[in-house]
Amino acid sequence: MEQRQASVKETLKVAVSGVRGVVGATFTPQLAATFAQAFGTYIGAGPVVVGRDTRPSGLMIEQAVVAGLQSVGGTPVLAGITPTPSLLMISARLGIRGGIAITASHNPADWNALKFIGPDGLFLSEIRAQELFDIYHQQDFPLVAEHEIRTVREEKYPTEDHFKRILDYVDVAAIRNRKLKIAVDCGNGVGALYSPFLLGTLLGCEVVPVFDTPSGLFEREPEPLPQHLDVLRRVVVDQKCDIGFAQDPDGDRLAVVDETGAPLGEDMTLALAVWQGLAEHERGPVCVNVPTSRVVEVIAGYHACPVIRTRIGEINVAEAMIKHKAVIGGENIGGVMISRIHPCRDSFAGMAVIAELLARKGRPVSALIAEWPRFAIARGKRAIRPDAAPAILRQLRQAHDPATINLLDGLFIDEGDHWVHVRRSNTESVMRVTAEAATPEMARALVDRYLQEVERLMDEPTPTVPGEYT
């Protein structure tokens, strides 16, 4: 019984990516209300936009967040079921103090989360998030009197500004003229409400929707990995679609299936977007996270554009994009980030710019990527005790030549013809391993080898060094 209680406790994750856990176990309305009080205290009284994905627990958590914000003088602005990138753009409006996204993104269906957004329309940085958590732990909130409680407002058109920015960026006429047929797997998430409208009504494509009921009752796993896209793959082939897209529940991740039904992997999503962005829009620096495929460097190099790598995490890439004046960037999880739209992961912008690529080139996806050098990527993860991560990473580091190691984010080992990245997840109690090599077999073997090492080291009693790895 004690072991079960410990494992349940470990499902609550409090990190720069927000606060998330299993609904009814570690993630409760009481927790959400208290964090909303802390956030309202942190940013000061004023309008705070609140949006959610389609999970059934979302409305319950939204009501708790509203109560928490109102209790400290905040004015909740409810956007309802809204894509996370749309919510970020609303939060950047003049007069909005910040935002709270109620979404566990790619996590399993029984999870939910709060993600905190600043007035700049970006998620809180690590330093700002720590300041918020300090306020939460102090539990000293400036509760207001009855006459100071603010009325809840409503954001009626939460995607209007977001979609306008996308339409201003891409060549709408070219996409309309191409008359693309696109299958889109909305995963029963926010895309069910918005993706057919963007692709069909606004961009003039013929849309074949898949899992397009916004119920939050996921009929496939929430994370749009290749192994979860069997239905989309069949639909693309059976309906003779030009391309297939798959989204996660809150609409910030995008996966691509080519016209033959082959899933390309999330790294190729970013590569396609970078290719079109640099070729047709503007050239400049590209910012990506550490474990992004080298194919992005090949594409950027063709256009003589530098690539800057950052720690994993949307806010880390966004801040680097702003600092280096990057024109495009993203993460290797299918997170496309276009500066002229907004420096955030955005599956809707990703779909539009890839549709523009197909319209401009007039060739199938498989033929386009056949022109690139191919790098094989494999991924895996192992459950760990959170306190075991620093010692595991330290011992793995000691087994390698220091010249091959980068400690920017976890442990990145570059052996020239392949690389391996090992890090503790910010969103789950797992160690993630990613490897890139010349063939799928080599990449898979590298991942399996390091996962075995993680498992072996986890069983060994070793001292930890607090703060060495995060």
Image: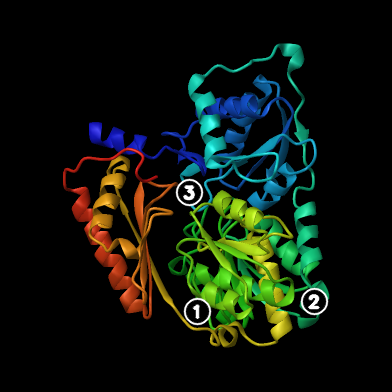
Relative image position of residue 75 (x, y in whole percent): 73, 28
Q: Is residue 429 visible?
A: yes
Ranked by sequence position, the earlier of labels 1 and 2 is 2
Q: Could you say where residue 2 lies in the image, as x and y percent from the top left?
A: 24, 31
Q: Secondary structure at mark 1?
A: loop
Dots 3, 2 in contact, CB < 8 A: no
Q: Looking at the rendered structure, which numbered label has been put on residue 176?
A: 2
First in residue order: circle 3 vs circle 2? 3
Q: What SS does tag 2 mark?
A: helix
Task: Please name whichever residue, 103 or 216, is drawn nearer the observer in this view of the structure.
Answer: 103
First in sequence: mark 3 vs mark 1:
3
Identified at 80% across, 76% down, the residue is 176
- Residue 273 in the image: x percent, y percent? 63, 71
User: Badge 3, how many Cα within 10 Å: few under 14, some, many 20+?
Assistant: many
Would you name the residue on which mark 1 appears?
262
Read off the residue under disc 3: 109
User: Which image quarter: residue 172?
Assistant: bottom right
Q: Residue at x 65, y 64 (%)?
A: 328
> In front: mark 3 or mark 2?
2
Instruction: Assess whether mark 1 and mark 3 are in contact (beta carbons under 8 angstroms).
Output: no
Label 1, label 2: how far apart the Cα atoms are: 25 Å
Residue type, label 3: Ala
Residue 449, relative to residue 29: is it above or below?
Answer: below
Q: Nearer the viewer, residue 380 or 337?
A: 337
Query: Which residue is drawn at the image coordinates 75% and 29% (left, top)?
Result: 152
Is residue 127 depicted above or below 181 in this figure?
A: above
Seen as rendered, the residue at the extreme left is 460
SS for dot 3: loop
Question: What residue is drawn where x is 22% and y is 60%?
Answer: 399
